[in-house]
Image: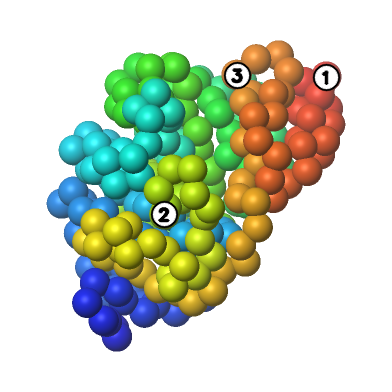
Amino acid sequence: MKSTANIVTVDARHPDEQTIADAAALIRQGGVAIIPTSGLYGLAVDAFNTDALDRIYRLKRRDTNKALLVLIDRMEMLDQVAAEIDPAGRALMNHFWPGGVTFIVPARPDTPRRLTAGSGKIGVRWVRHPVAAALARHLQSPLTGTSANVSGTGGCANVDQIGGDVLASVDLVLDAGPLAGGPGSTVADITRAKSIILREGAVPANEIIIQFEKYRSR
């Protein structure tokens, strides 16, 4: 494990097990880490630690009325934050996951309000990046995945692009090198009879709408 200050270099494809274990232990204790997600670096904390969630809002200067999405590494982890999802919704997730779609689904009643912003809904993505997936798997718990930037500024595909104030405010940075970049995940609300695209990103909105209608008609 090679580190400079709080920046730790990690193999993007085959992350070192001890590096992941150390990062997971820090997150479990309430720490904030910058981690690689599919295309951009994100801020990762234990999704159930309200103090750590508050740190993210302060760090990003984020409006507390805006929810935070979470990352999972398998379908079974979805049940930790989501209430019942109908068969069409599950089929849609199986079609696009893991990958670049964040699905908005009904939240469990005990899901932290910081994640839902009081909406009763939660944004979830099965993350593809091996480092983020290994962290969630080690924790056996969802992680936050909001972009590692101050709200209103662009996301970062390289650690060198992340603002110094953000870097100084976190406990750990897992540097997996340059990421793909791009517009981030597509966000689709599937809590209603029709899929509502809240943000078009890595996956074309029309693909999601077509598949959702297909599964609904079965």
Q: Nearer the viewer, mark 3 or mark 2?
A: 2
Amino acid type at image mark 3:
Thr
Q: Is residue 46 above or below residue 179?
A: above
The residue under label 2 is 148
Measured in 3D between alpha carbons, the distance from the residue under mark 1 to the one under mark 2, in whole angstroms, is: 39 Å
Amino acid type at image mark 2:
Ala
Q: Earlier in the sequence, mark 3 or mark 2?
A: 2
Q: Earlier in the sequence, mark 1 or mark 3?
A: 3
Q: Badge 3: few (under 14), some or many (20 or more) residues near its Cα, within 10 Å?
A: some
Q: Earlier in the sequence, mark 1 or mark 2?
A: 2
Q: Secondary structure at mark 1?
A: loop
Q: Secondary structure at mark 3?
A: loop
The residue under label 3 is 191
Answer left or right for 191 relative to 49: right
Q: Residue furthest left?
A: 29
Residue shown at the point (29%, 47%) measured from the top left:
59
**Nearer-the-camera pick, 114 or 92:** 114
Measured in 3D between alpha carbons, the distance from the residue under mark 1 to the one under mark 3, in whole angstroms, is: 16 Å
**Would residue 169 be visible to someone looking at this image?**
yes
